[in-house]
Image: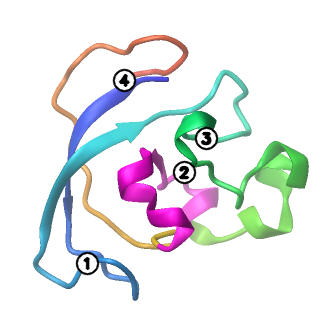
Amino acid sequence: MSFAKSTLVAALYAGSASAGTVNHGKMSMWSSTPDTLVGYKSEGSACKYADKDMGGLSAPTAQTPYIKAKKYCAVNRGMFGGGEICGACYRISYNGDQEQGLGRPG
C-alpha cells in the first residue's frame, strides 16, 4: 500500500469531526486488485462498501456517486475509528511522495 501524507479538513458527514476541524493523517491507496479498496487488515481498517466478497465495485453498496466517481480512500486504524467514520467526507491533499509497495501515488 502507498501512504501519502494528507490533510483532512471538515468532516461533513455526521461523524468524528466537526466542521472546521483540521486533522493530519495518512491515506492508503488501492490494493493490487483494481476493484477492491482496503486499508491494512492487520490495523483493522478495510472498506466494506466495495469489498471483493460483496462484489467489488459492482456491489450494491458501491453504487453511490462517491464510489462510482472514485472519490474515496481507505485510512489507517487511528482514522478508521472502528468503522464509525465510514461515509465521512474530507478534503485530501497529496504531497508528492512516491508510492511504496502495491499502491500508486496521487
Give me the disc on residue 70: 2
Point out the image quarter for the C terminus. Answer: top left
Q: Is residue 100 above or below residue 2?
A: above
Which tag is nearer the camera, tag 2 or tag 1?
1
**x, y percent for residue 37:** 63, 42
How far is disc 4 from disc 1 in space, using C-alphas?
26 Å
The disc labelled 4 sits on which kind of residue? Pro
Q: Is residue 86 left or right of residue 14?
A: right
**Label 4, on which residue?**
105
How far is disc 3 from disc 2 in space, using C-alphas?
13 Å
- The 10 Å Cα crowd at callout 4, few under 14, some 14 to 19, many 20 or more, is some
- Residue at figure coordinates x 40%, y 12% from the top left: 100
Which tag is nearer the camera, tag 3 or tag 4?
3
The disc labelled 3 sits on which kind of residue? Val
SS for tag 1? loop
SS for tag 3? loop
- Residue at figure coordinates x 47%, y 49% from the top left: 73
**Label 3, on which residue?**
38
**Label 1, on which residue?**
17
Q: Is residue 51 left or right of residue 44?
A: right
Q: Are marks 2 and 1 in contact (CB under 8 Å)?
A: no
